[in-house]
Amino acid sequence: MMMMGISSSATLSFLSFLVLLFSTGSWAANSNSVHGDFLQCLSSLQNPSTPIPIFTPNNSNFTTLFRSSARNLRFLSPNSTQPQFIITPTHESHVQAAVVCCRKHGLDLKVRSGGHDVEGLSYWSDDPFVIVDLVDYRNITVDVEAKTAWIQAGASLGEVYFKVANASKTLGFPAGFCPTVGVGGHISGGGIGALVRKYGLASDQVIDARIVTVDGKILDKRTMGKDLFWAIRGGGASSYGVILSWKVKLVDVTPIVTVATVGRTLEQGGTDLVHRWQFIADRLHEDIYIGLTMTVGNGSRAGEKTVLTQFSFLFLGDTDRLLRLMEESFPELGLNRSDCKEMSWVESHVYFFAPGRPIEFLWDRDHETKSFLKIKADYVREPISKAGLEGIWKRFMGGQSPAMLWTPMGARMNEISESELPYPHRAGNIYNIMYVGNWVQESESEKQIDWMRRFYSYMGRYVSKNPRSAYLNYKDLDLGQNENGDSEATRYIKARSWGRKYFKSNFVRLVKVKSMVDPGNFFKNKQSIPPIKSWGKN
């Protein structure tokens, strides 16, 4: 049952009822004591004026809430484990209580802001666990004069874009394309979007934060110190605590931006255009973003397949200037005035994700149809030859319904040091690749994942090496996993193999920070940063 909106005395009585319920055989006997003790712990820490909203499996809304923002059906099968409790905090003290009580009573803690963790690590665990779902913790406060915003971790990107644009037509925030992604995880992993070449990552804009640490304390930039503040901006904050809110710099955008979408098949010269794109996409004027999406469609002949290439533009300026710049740098594409649309910056987010929908669409957190999903990532540092592209297309068309998104880097990204933040993929990277496998039947999962792995293996010859880099927000457990029962040394050696792919040499510093702030490894998942206790003493 949910405790929000009832009196404090009723809340305490309800918690007492739950404690009694769990001690009289309603749940498995070996877990009764833990459940009851956990609820009693919450009750003891609860402020009567702000009761803790908590759901149990006995509540009729429990399964609906659990599944509501769990985006990947691979982790929602009937055999998937469910949490012992779901807490939906409305006050930071609720998060503090959840951390303290989970740690005290040996329950794993998962924190979900938008549910877009592609490996489901924000809503499943091998161990008994509690979910802190931040769906009701998403206030956004914009200071137009200071060009800043405080954003609670449960807010979605769409809500941020809408709120910022509502406050100012000439301010924006550089982050991802999908409006339902939660800012808590997105910013803590980096955050790539259409303004990445102009302003860098979402995490590059963070100027303060509030986090609940393993001992239940709330720290900000001043009190957490420079090392922890560095680690949570691109190193995966879930390894260090629970992010409550981010304070970010807002960036200047033009009152009118120009968007365009140009599609070409292989028969229409797609290979030549993609090849040329690799030589200019990261070198264009910083106001121009040209993302590239590849999918598989029907060819010009019956029964044949082809690759559909789609060039997506966001330009901070008007159509006339964009056309002039394209004529100078990428005339081969043949961008025409009829391809272009002028609109506000916030409208561009609807255009790229759901063309034709009203701006209010950005407030909708649950409009997506769920599917089974597997994602991988790469970075490309040298252009792929035309022959190489043709080999890629041949294998790509062997997939059932694959997609690739190639996101150009360069400009501002080249100006930021690899060690400035944990995200290291800066100068020298032409573009990032996201590989997407998407299907609707669980029976297809083995086949789809096998194809994705084989295609990823084939792509290895064309992408970054030593290490083959990866992007934390496109998490991939195929790179390696933490296992329960591993020794400290084994855990570190395993984690170093995938940690270097995400963070390069920054991985070692992340381990040192983890060792200082969470030496007991309470905040953990299959790819969390491991501690080395002796390092935390230095």
Image (cartoon, rainbow, N blue to C red):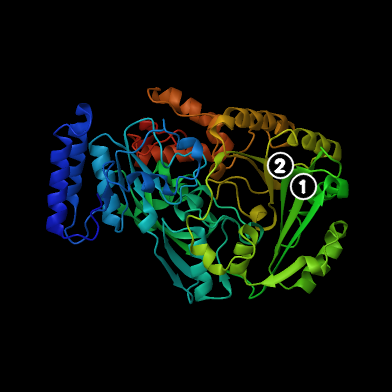
Judge by depth and name the residue closer to the eye, 218 or 155: 155
Q: Is residue 447 visible?
A: yes
- Report x, y in % for residue 145: 48, 77
| Amino acid beneath label 2 | Val
Judge by depth and name the residue closer to the eye, 313 or 497: 313
Secondary structure at numbered mark 1: strand
Query: In the figure, is residue 131 to the left or right of 329?
Result: left
Which residue position holds label 2? 380
Q: Residue at x 78, y 54 (%)?
A: 263
Local crowd size for mark 1, using a 10 Å CA cut-off: few (<14), some (14–19), many (≥20): many
Secondary structure at numbered mark 2: strand
Q: Residue at x 37, y 22 (%)?
A: 485
Q: Quadrant of residue 464?
A: top right
- Report x, y in % for residue 268: 87, 50
Nearer to us: label 2 or label 1: 1
Query: Height in image: 28 above or below 305?
Result: above
Report, in whole angstroms, how far the alpha carbon at label 2 lies from the one at label 1: 20 Å
Query: Height in image: 326 above or below 111?
Result: below
Query: In the figure, is residue 14 to the left or right of 168?
Result: left
Residue 489's disc is: none
